[in-house]
Amino acid sequence: MGTQNNLWLEKKDHRAMFFLYNRFIENAGFYNDNSSRLKTRETVSAPPQKIISDLTDFVDFVVDDRGEREDLIGALKSFDINYDRDELNTSFKVKGLMLKVFYQSCLGANDFDWISNSDDRLVNFIWASILLISNEDQFRDGVFQSISIDKTAPRSELYDTYENKLLYSSLHLNNHPASNRGKIFNITLFFDLCRFDLREKTSLMNILKSRWSGIKNSSKVINWLSKNECLWGWAWDYAFSRYLNSKEPLWLELNSTESYEIEKSKKMALITFNDLLRLEHQLLVISELKKSGAQQKYRMKLQGEGAPRKMVQISMSVSTKDKLKKLADRENQKMNHVVEMLINERYLQLYGNNQ
């Protein structure tokens, strides 16, 4: 089988090939209850030549009037695609019918054109948004794209989002694409391989566009970060501990070993986190960052390399020391640093920046 070597073109048909391989070969049993073929989930790991070979065999089986023909006919009927039975006897016409199923199931290439490869913020927003979808209702309703935090107990709610089964992970797509181009490729695969109809996929894309249009000109966090480059790492660590319960989201990328690159990655992570928040919570976070950031800059000034230091011995109750240790563990700091921090913060409250 597989004699039609020029039937499928790797570059021209690559999106359609991934979708059709997933739809008619790898997960045929998922779509057709009577299919005896196994559901193995290897779509994105299967090499192109295997996909081409298997799709060519599928076409040959349809032409030979094997069980695969009924699979294709069932898909055509589900989309009310008109066809002539004679078309099922010619390889290239069978491919054409399969492509009609693809076009009726998936967004067009132009629907992804607005996700610019050169816009890190936009790509990361879309990327993080689809990673947050944990169930089909979220996909349909678009509620995933806004994260909420509890104002009275900000550590208590957000991280629960990551405990659920994520749709993206269920598709076995790449969790760590190395570039914006790789992210866009996997975003496209996510839309193609999710088992939702074209209307629902179109609705989801429109929701993302609408959400992005509402935040792309929001620059409060970006302006603050541009004025406080020394706080990039601190700001992410602060949000990471306070709002994410120190649980790394899937979209966090801190792969570099260079300290400055890590700081830039943390800056981008904070921007993405902010973009995923509801507007009222964006205002809450930037307010807290400004307040705590001012205190952090003052602490950094006092704790600089040139700052004189002196050993001080103090006694405290056992329960107070336990509380100090708990604070130090929460802030990932040594206990003496926490004592300094608390003293400096209280000093700021009483006397401001006056020495």
Image (tube, rainbow, N blue to C red):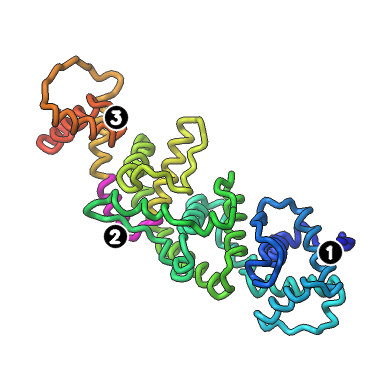
Quarter of the view holding residue 80: bottom right
Q: Is residue 334 above or below residue 242?
A: above
Residue found 55% across the figure and 75% down from its top: 199
Q: Considering only order in the chain, which callout, 1 or 3, is on the residue closer to the N terminus?
A: 1
User: Main structural element of the magenta stretch: helix, strand or loop?
Assistant: helix
Residue type at the position of mark 3: Gln
Question: Does residue 99 show up magenta in the picture?
Answer: no
Per the model, the C-alpha gap separating discs 3 and 1 is: 62 Å
Question: Horizontal and vertical percent for residue 37?
Answer: 71, 64
Looking at the rendering, the stretch of residues picked out in magenta corresponds to 276-289
Is residue 110 in view from this perspective?
yes
Is disc 3 surrounded by few (<14), some (14 to 19) or many (20+) residues within 10 Å? few
Q: For residue 280, which numbered disc appears in the image?
A: 2
Quarter of the view holding residue 9: bottom right
Question: Horizontal and vertical percent for residue 73?
Answer: 74, 78
Question: Horizontal and vertical percent for residue 48?
Answer: 75, 53
Q: Considering only order in the chain, which callout, 1 or 2, is on the residue closer to the N terminus?
A: 1
Q: Nearer the viewer, mark 2 or mark 3?
A: 3
Q: For residue 333, which numbered disc appears in the image?
A: 3
Quarter of the view holding residue 71: bottom right
Residue type at the position of mark 2: Glu
- In the displayed image of the protein, which residue is found farthest to the right? 3
Is disc 1 surrounded by few (<14), some (14 to 19) or many (20+) residues within 10 Å? some
Q: Considering only order in the chain, which callout, 3 or 2, is on the residue closer to the N terminus?
A: 2
Tag 1 residue: 7
Tag 2, which secondary structure? helix
Q: Is residue 25 above or below residue 282?
A: below
Which is nearer the eye, 323 or 269? 323
